[in-house]
Image (cartoon, coloured by chain):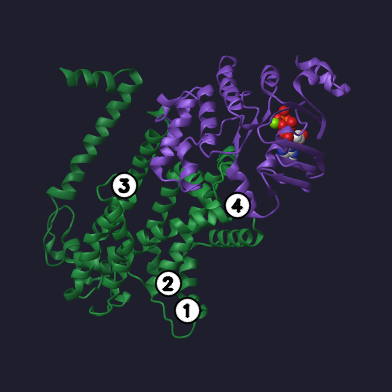
Chain colours: A green, B purple
Amino acid sequence: MHSLNWIKQNLFSTWLNSIVSIVLIYFLASVIPPLLDWFIFEATFIADDRTGCTTEGACWAVVGARFYQFMYGFYPTEEVWRVNLVYAMLPFGIAPLLWDKIPFRKQFLFFSMAYPFLVFFLLYGGPGLSSVASNKWGGLLVTLFLGLGGILIAFPLSIFLALGRRSKMPAILTLCIVFIEFIRGVPLITLLFFGNIMLPLFLPEGINLDTIIRALVAVTIFQAAYGAEVIRGGLQAMPKGQYEAAQALGLSYWQMNYKIILPQALKITIPALVNTAIGLFKDTSLVLLIGLLDLLGIGRAALADTKWMALHVEVYVFIAGIFFIFCFGFSRYSLYLERKLNTDNDGENK
Amino acid sequence: MNQDSIIYFENVSKWFGDFQVLKGINLEVNKGEKIVVCGPSGSGKSTMIRCINRLEEHQEGKIIVDGTELTGNVKNIDTVRREVGMVFQQFNLFPHLSILDNCTLAPIWVRKMPKVEATELAMQYLKRVQIEDQVHKFPNQLSGGQQQRAAIARALCMQPRLMLFDEPTSALDPEMIKEVLDVMIGLAQDGMTMLVVTHEMGFAKEVADRIVFMDEGQIVEAKAPKEFFENPDSERTKLFLSQIL
Ligand SMILES: Nc1ncnc2c1ncn2[C@@H]1O[C@H](COP(=O)(O)OP(=O)(O)OP(=O)(O)O)[C@@H](O)[C@H]1O
Ligand SMILES: [Mg+2]
């Protein structure tokens, strides 16, 4: 009885509502069963090549056959535990940055700071570990390395750039404006090419940056410039009185920004910041064009294999699914943050 | 400059672009003195008191606050700001911090006071302005009068030697003005040196040692309240008084 009431009140409360509901129900009823058939009931999950896919639905066997490459690229199998270790530690490296109420957060934060170095050591190799050049990396590994790496390193940089762009010191101001405007003025792909070809020319002889590091530099400065503009918008929205009260209390420039201005300015820029972060995460697939095989690159490689030819839909749906999981995660996190900051700070919104 | 002087203005001038806001201000305030500054809108009252903690920069003349001359020297500015508390018309509490955190922030970060000690100190001042039962609330959960009293407590937590008030009651509903003025009167009775920009002439009569009247960037008159109200020298003062009394 309860559910009947609910349906009546929510789906058929008015004429217009009823019509929309009926159309929607009809649409779902005609779309969902075939989709489920294709995805699951009529799909083939195990096969040796595409001729093994005899059913009507999706041929997921291609994903299974290429799963290793999707996750690790061409990372040597006997060393793959290193990548697995990096994946396994990722939640512990990131969680303390994302949530402030987890137990032992202080201790975990030290781990977060050590994590990037651990990642480099494990993935590249070093004392005690054989070296694995980045042309062997691929798939999700490259996507996460560039996407998450770029976003996390760029965040503090964008804060400094945004502050610099409001600086009273002409040298710093000019530097920040030129940097931001230049980076924002060119497409990411040019930065990637630029990083790949030009960066080595600027570096002293003998220092040879790996392709993936050049890509990381390009992705990071791109994101930093965009993030800086977003944060600058937040800074501009701050009332002058907040600066004056902080100064009158004797806070230094950095104390004022750290304790008073940034917490408020960042709060209002979270949605826009996450938006640029999601954009960047997806744009990392452009590294395909400088010869790195991210998820999309591996997918294209799979499609070029005669054994699995023409399974575009399956491959792209799978890749889209992985991207979606991460981007949806970002956007949920930003909602969580907004809500948390609102209840934390403004009694009104409780 | 005499021994007891805590604020010393000598021939201070300031321009906003081509517009001269302060025209050769001379003023000396002694320790413990209460000064009320009044004058028509745009006469430079805010600008003058904001020069005292360098929220505004003067271009000519000399300002010495508690023995420290205000120049471009950042160290000097920091020294002065630590000793000078300020209360604003719009309160300017930090909306993302609780009332208590608003108060302990500067003692902890600027005075490097341990948190426990800063909290104790803050509670003492919050009790004094009678909002000790609101300390865990956020600013926008308080009434205007409570917010302004919290702002006074926040300034006092730095244990300043001198307090500046820029129209502290102008943004308040009439029924809340008294609660803020009462706090200020209490402060004055405790011997705090105060410089108050206000049009509350009742407060001026009760508390001020001297009333400074400004017009068009100049100090037109500076006298004890009785003299000021009964015997103003200048026509401009008379006109002003006739408008507000
Ligand atoms: N940042 C600024 N830039 C340009 N002009 C300014 C600035 N601040 C103030 N002024 C001008 O300087 C003059 C004096 O301003 P000030 O705020 O000191 O006046 P006031 O006596 O406090 O007036 P009120 O009673 O309205 O607060 C005004 O004409 C104002 O327009
Ligand atoms: Mg004013």
Query: Between disc 2 and disc 3, whose residue precedes?
Result: 3
Q: Residue at x 77, y 37 (%)?
A: B27
Mark nearest the camera among 2 and 3 is: 3
Q: Which quadrant is home to the C terminus of chain A?
A: top left
Disc 4 chain ID: A
Spatial CA span between label 4 and label 2: 29 Å
Q: Nearer the viewer, residue A209 or A61?
A: A209
Disc 4 to disc 2: CB gap under 8 Å: no
Residue tagged 3: A99
State the image coordinates of residue B21 (x, y, percent, origin top left).
79, 38
Q: Residue at x 55, y 53 (%)?
A: A163
Q: Nearer the viewer, residue A93 or B11?
A: B11
Q: Residue at x 23, y 78 (%)?
A: A129
Residue tagged 4: A166
Residue tagged 1: A200
The amino acid type found where label 2 is placed reads Arg
* Residue B238 image-quadrant placement: top right
Disc 1 to disc 2: CB gap under 8 Å: yes
Is A216 displayed left or right of A4 in the figure? right
The amino acid type found where label 3 is placed reads Trp
Task: Rate crowding at label 2 as few (under 14), some (14 to 19) or many (20 or more) other CA atoms within 10 Å.
Answer: many
User: Does the image show residue A158?
Assistant: yes
Question: Marks 4 and 3: same chain?
Answer: yes
Disc 3 chain ID: A
Query: Between disc 1 and disc 2, whose residue precedes?
Result: 1
Disc 1 chain ID: A
Mark nearest the camera among 1 and 3 is: 3
Q: Nearer the viewer, residue B219 or A243?
A: B219
